[in-house]
Amino acid sequence: MHVVAAVLRDARGRILLARRTAGRDLAGAWEFPGGKVEPGETALQALDRELREELGIRIGPARPLVSVPQAYPGKRIVLDVYEVDQFEGTARGLERQALAWAPAEKLASYPMPPADRPVVAALTAADRYLITPEPTDRPGFLSKLDKALAAGARRIQLRARAMAAADLAILARDAQIRCRAKGAQLLLNGEPGLAADLGLGLHLRSAQLMALSARPVLAEGQPVAASCHDADELAQAERLGLDFVVLGPVRATESHPGVAPMGWEKFAALREGVSLPIYALGGMKPADVAVARRHGGQGVAGVRGLWPK
Ligand SMILES: Nc1nc2c([nH]c(=O)n2[C@@H]2O[C@H](COP(=O)(O)OP(=O)(O)OP(=O)(O)O)[C@@H](O)[C@H]2O)c(=O)[nH]1
Ligand SMILES: [Mg+2]
């Protein structure tokens, strides 16, 4: 089932949500206004029709945001979401549905269908997840980090697997100060204790993820993420209530020559089974954000393709 929906903003930048009425599936959930594409319609024709029927507005140009494949009990949908910057008329609940204009940072507090979580993440969180190369010289590393932050990196994983614990703690603090100054999230790879002590986020390796029975406890508001390669790992990440994951390798990479790439079709098929925000990993460059979004991804993750030269 192909479903189209719109992100509409008011003059204050708040986003329109509509509440599903009683007697339909997912009744009571808040959603982005829209509906099913009918036979013979294009996605944009369907969006225009649905918003006229449900809200009484005529929409201007629409830009694709993300297209989320999602499996529900007994059906599979692709939720195709567009950002619409201009519309004519005043939005009203013509089908007796309640409407709410929500600030972007409040979206996550509305109960929404599973397919909408990746949409909210696409609207509010970074589309690139930068993984650092193994730090060798500290000044060189920190100046590259500054460069990445200046270029807009807002979600960064410090991955230092060969470093002595004491050195890692010092480097992590230096990196933390720089990230804080730019409002960027910093997640430490594989070290739950140090991440908790320093007030950093945590990135779990897949083996660590599978060995846990509860989400690791961190400082207030710090994210927990994980590396996933298959449906079991994704399901575990969702069970533990993680904030996001990386999934791959989508393409072949120099760093893992023996590993068969999954490709975008498999990426999208795996994404259907969970409602987590997912970054594509493996041979990714910033220009691949668009293809990742077309397959339901949050964006791209990587070392080589994202770390400054
Ligand atoms: N419009 C909309 N539908 C969503 C969202 N998220 C999501 O999972 N869906 C699902 O996509 C499907 C959309 O169908 P719908 O019931 O709104 O379709 P419709 O407007 O054509 O109306 P209908 O009820 O008369 O068939 C439902 O299964 C709904 O649960 C969302 O954000 N917006
Ligand atoms: Mg609808």
Image: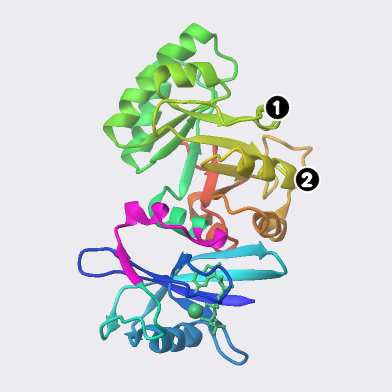
Residue 133 position, x and y percent, is: 53, 28
Q: Can the viewer see residue 309 in this picture?
A: no
User: Is disc 1 surrounded by few (<14), some (14 to 19) or many (20+) residues within 10 Å?
Assistant: few
Question: Mark 2 belongs to which amino acid?
Answer: Ala
Residue 130: image x %, image y %? 48, 38
Instruction: Say above or below: 134 vs 85.
Output: above
Q: Nearer the viewer, mark 1 or mark 2?
A: 1
- Residue drawn 54% across and 8% down? 164
Residue at mark 2: 260
The magenta stretch is 99-116
Rendered residue at 74%/43% (across/down) = 232
Q: Position of residue 34 (x, y in %)?
A: 47, 78
Residue extending farthest front: 22
Residue 211's disc is 1
| Magenta-colored stretch includes residue 27 | no
What is the image's colouring?
A: rainbow
Q: Is residue 110 magenta?
A: yes
**Residue at the limit of the structure toward the left, as seen here:** 11
Does the beta carbon of the residue at mark 2 sit less than 8 Å from ligand 1? no
In the image, what residue type sits under mark 1? Ala
Q: Judge whether residue 246 can be spotted in this image.
A: yes
Question: In which quadrant will I find the C terminus?
Answer: top left
